[in-house]
Image (cartoon, rainbow, N blue to C red):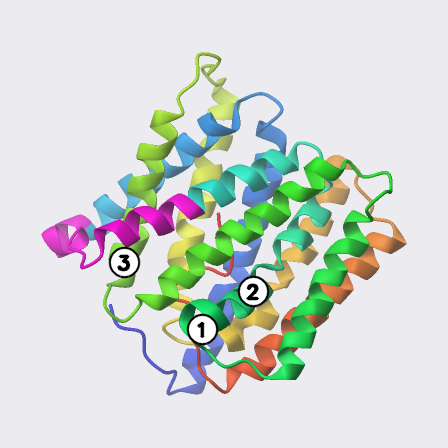
Amino acid sequence: MKIRLPTLASDRERGIALVLITMALFAGYDAISKYLTRFYPVTELLWARYVMHAVFMLAVFGPRMRLDLVRTHHPVLQIARSAFLVASTFLFMSGLRYLPLADATAINFVTPLLVTALSIPMLGEKVEARARIAVLVGFGGVLIIIRPGGGMLQLAAALPFLAACCSSLYQVFTRKYRRSENPITLHFYTGLIGVAATSIGWQSDWTMPTLAHSLLLVFHAFSATFGHYLLILAYQRIWPAAAAPFTYTQLVWSLLFGWTLYGEAPDAGSLFGIAVIVTSGMYVARRLSGRKAISGDSNRGR
């Protein structure tokens, strides 16, 4: 599957629609994650998520691609980048146990800014001074939300930020090898390595979910797996940098889910920090959109 430039207005419209659907799915995934972590270990939830991911990829693409689904020029890369994504997902879901949904999501949204910062030393990309300043401003937004020395549990607040760090490394590796690897193969290895990693982390306190929770687990895994697939389809029609403004609709969904499901109403400081991160991210995306950079996958780890 080749990444191509959008050539028709309808392509761009479909790409935007796919991004908007994906962001709603990701926000739903996070909302369910926050609920299920009250009852089950994070590693158990991740195992179920990545098993469905791998099964979905095998069922949909296995019959058509056969060995091409697993053929890779960089097997070590596949392990490393997928491990970063698993670590990112684990850290973020762990943080959801203690943090408001919108705050955790906003902190994690520094991922595009971190990718921009890391692309300079790791990919040799040139980033203009104004974009670098916007990256620093975005990090300031994180500090506004965390408020060091304030009432928020500091270790918990660090978890989504560490998740963003791992996710940014995952995306940098993906971008570095996007031209030599099929994006579907990249996506398949994400699930395969995820299953292996979470199986190693099997714990004695894993419990059998109830019927209601089993249904939630299915939708939980479906939201992440299908969401990432839709994002691949979206990036065939619209450049990720051009899609970036629409990815921030996930924050709107997170605010809505946090308020309606968990009674979480962010205070003025959190809302200001969220606004700073969003503004910085959108500015950087706008400055980079003319360069037509492709990340090859998602804007964040799920």
* Residue at 82% in and 49% down: 147
8 in the magenta segment: no
- Alpha carbon distance from label 1 to label 2: 22 Å
Give the amino acid at mark 3. Ile
Residue 218 on image: x %, y %: 43, 34
Q: Residues within 10 Å of mark 2 (few under 14, many from 20)?
A: many
Asked if the residue under mark 2 is in contact with the one under mark 1, i.e. CB atoms within 8 Å, the reply is no
Q: Secondary structure at mark 3?
A: helix
Q: Main secondary structure of the magenta part?
A: helix
Q: Earlier in the sequence, mark 1 or mark 2?
A: 1
81 in the magenta segment: yes
Q: Nearer the viewer, residue 127 or 187?
A: 127
Residue 124's image quarter?
bottom left
Residue 61 on image: x %, y %: 21, 52
Q: Which residue is mark 2?
A: 112
Mark 1 or 3, closer to the camera = 3
* Residue at 69% in and 75% down: 133
Q: Is residue 203 visible?
A: yes
Residue 43 circle label: none
Query: Which quadrant of the figure contains the N terminus?
Result: bottom left
- Alpha carbon distance from label 1 to label 3: 20 Å
Give the amino acid at mark 2. Pro
Residue 160's image quarter?
top right
Q: Which residue is mark 1?
A: 14
Q: Earlier in the sequence, mark 1 or mark 3?
A: 1
- Alpha carbon distance from label 3 to label 2: 22 Å
Q: Is residue 294 visible?
A: no
Q: Which residue is mark 3?
A: 184
Q: Earlier in the sequence, mark 3 or mark 2?
A: 2
* Residue at 74% in and 36% down: 262
Q: Nearer the viewer, residue 197 or 42?
A: 197
| Residue span colored magenta | 62-84
